Image (tube, rainbow, N blue to C red):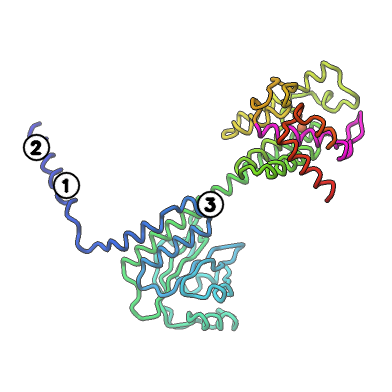
Amino acid sequence: MKDASRRLKKSLHRKKVACAVRPENVDYNKIVLAVDSFINIHTMSNKDFLEKIFVGAFKLIPEAEKGSFYELIDDRYVPIVSSGYDLEVLQKLVFNREDAFADYECSDSARIEAYEKYIDERDDTRFSEEMINILRELGTYSKYTSLYAPIQVEGVNVGLICFDCFTKTGFTKTSKKILKFYAQIISNFYTQKLLYEKEKKMYHDVVAALVSAIEVKDKYTEGHAQRVREYSCDIAKELQLSNSKINDISTAALLHDIGKIGISTEILNKPGKLTKDEYDIIKLHPIYTKTILEKISGFSSIANFAYNHHENYNGTGYPRGLKYDEIPFESQIIQVADAYDAMTSERAYRKALSTHQALKIISEETGKQFNPKIAKAAIKVFSKLTSS
Ligand SMILES: [Fe+2]
Ligand SMILES: [Fe+2]
C-alpha cells in the first residue's frame, strides 16, 4: 500500500514538472487570436458572431489571402461574409446546391473536415458566361488554392467556408486543423440556431392552438385575444418597457381568457344579460387561466400576468380584490386593453361603444379601475387609433 502511494506521488511529481515546462514552439500570439475570436460571442447577433468567427479563422491561417463564407438560404448559397474580396462583387455569385460544391469534392455525406484543392482551370460548360466574368473579376477563375470546409447541420451541408491562396504554396497541416475546428464551431452554432427556431415555432403554434380553442368555444371572443395583445403591446411600448417584458405581456394578453374553456358554453354564449350566479361562474375564469398556464414550463410569470387581468387598481376587481402595487404592472396593462376591447365590441345585449365613449370611461375611471400611469399611456395609444 505504501509502495503504491509512493509510486503515485512520484508520478504526480513528474507530471507537475512536465506541465511546468513550456514547449518552445507554441505561438502564443495565435492562442491570443483564437481566444479573442470567442470573447463575448454569446452577446452578439448572428451576423456579428459569424463575422467575428470568420475573421478569427482568417487571422489564424497565414496562407489565406482572401476568404468567403456562404450560407444556404432558400436552397441557394449566398456569400454573407468575406475578407479580401469585394463583397458586392462576390454577392453576384449565388450558387444553387449543386454548383456551390462543383469545384470541390464535398458531398452532404462528407465529414466536417478541411479540404484543399488547387483550381488549375474551370470547366466552362458548368458556368454561365456571366459567372465566368465574375470569377475572373474576383481572381478565382483559375490558378489558386482553396482551403474549404462544409458547415453542416445533422449531416447536411448548410454553408461553406473557403480561404484562398494565390501562390503555389498551399496550406499547412496546422491551417487545415484550424479551419476544421472553426467549421465545427460554426456548424454547432447553426445546429443550435435551428433547434431554437424549431422550439420558437412550436411555442407559437401551441399559443395559437390555445387561442383558437377558446375562440371555438366562445363566439363573442373572436379576434378579442389578438386585439388585446396588440393594444397591450402598444401601451407597453408607449411606457417604454423592455423587449422581454413586452414579449411576456404579448403572450399573457393572447392567453388571458384561456380559462373560459372551463366555463359552460351556455353561459359563455348566453344572448341576454347574465344572472348573478352565472356572473359568479364567469368570474372563475382567471383562476382557470392560471391553472392551465402554470402547467406550461417557463410560463409562471405569464400565468401570473394573465391571472390578474380582472383586478382593479382600487381593489374592486376579482378574483382576489388586489389593489395598487399588489397587482402586477403587466396585468394592469392587459386589464386596460381588455376593458377597451370589451367596450368597443358589440355584445348580444348591447351595442359597441364608440372609441370616444370608451376613452371617456377610461379617463373617468383613472385612479379607480385603472392605474393612472397606464391609463394615460392607453388614452394616448387609443386616441392615435381613432385618428389613423
Ligand atoms: Fe377575462
Ligand atoms: Fe378578455
Q: Main secondary structure of the magenta part?
A: helix
Task: Say which of marks 3 and 1 sits in front.
Answer: 1
Q: Secondary structure at mark 3?
A: helix
Q: Which residue is mark 2?
A: 6
Does residue 259 belong to the magenta stretch? no
Q: Which residue is mark 3?
A: 193
Name the image quarter holding residue 241.
top right
Name the image quarter holding residue 168.
bottom left
**As drawn, 332 above or below 90:** above
Q: Which residue is mark 1?
A: 16
**Of the residues shown, which amino acid type is indicated by label 3?**
Lys
**Residue sitting at 32 percent across and 63 percent down?**
30
Between discs 2 and 1, the one toward the N terminus: 2
158 on left or right of 168: right
Between discs 2 and 3, the one toward the N terminus: 2
- Magenta span of residues: 329-358
Q: Tell me if mark 3 has few (under 14), some (14-19) or many (20+) residues whose alpha carbon lies within 10 angstroms of its own.
A: some
